Image: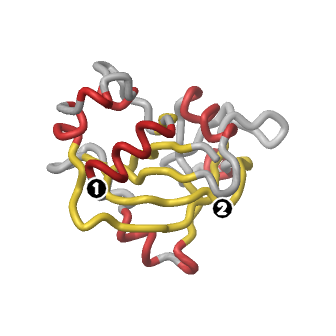
Amino acid sequence: MRFWLMKSEPNVFSIDDLMQRPNQIEPWEGVRNYQARNFMREMEIDDLAFFYHSNCKEAGIVGVMKIVKKAYIDDSAFDENSPYFDAKSTLENPRWWRVDVQFVEKFTQTITLHELKTKIELADFQLVQRGNRLSILPVTEMQWQFITQTLYG
């Protein structure tokens, strides 16, 4: 099992939105960064991911979800009416992928980016390093355990 962090702006799609979906499952679509896409292609069923609210008043980790479907073509890239449309992505040569995620847990409080940055144990966590703006990041098992057991536990 691997661990991930996946960012979404809560005004676009929040953990509460995920909780309201049928079976609490939703395709994680619209990723338009090659490195983030490559991370999605590495994901396996039952991998766990932190749900991270970004670009908001209180950015941070708000809960946990799991991968329930491995990477497959993100067909929103083919929809001219979609905000995720990409004219260069075709069925013959798709550029973009998505995974399906399922809600696991909503935290009672947000673990803020500021709090994460203050922990020496997370100094090598990509999220807290300057200039890292990727929407999907790998999380080491040590980082996962520290966050879930020390910061949230």
> Sequence order check: which comes first, mark 2 or mark 1?
2
Foreground of the two, 13 or 61: 61
Colouring convention used in this rendered image of the protein: secondary structure
Identify the amino acid type marked 2: Val
Find residue 18 and report its horizontal and vertical position in percent. Answer: 45, 68
**Residue located beneath label 1 in the image:** 152
- In 3D space, how far apart are the residues under numbered discs 2 and 1 (Cα atoms)? 24 Å
Image quadrant in which the C terminus is located:
bottom left
Where residue 16 sits, quadrant-wise, is bottom left
Residue drawn at 30 percent across, 64 percent down = 107
Relative vertical location of residue 2 with respect to residue 108 in this rendering, above or below:
above
Element type at mark 1: loop
Query: Residue 90's x, y, as percent?
Result: 75, 38
119 and 31: which is toward the camera: 119
Instruction: Indicate the amino acid at tag 1.
Output: Tyr
Identity of the residue drawn at 70% across and 48% down: 44
**Disc 2 marks which residue?**
68
Q: Residue at x 36, y 57 (%)?
A: 12
Find residue 20 and report its horizontal and vertical position in percent.
44, 78
Q: Residues within 10 Å of mark 2 (few under 14, many from 20)?
A: many
Q: Position of residue 54 (x, y in %)?
A: 30, 45
Give the left or right position of residue 29, taking residue 11 as reference.
right
Q: Could you say whether the residue bearing mark 2 is in a helix, strand or loop?
A: strand
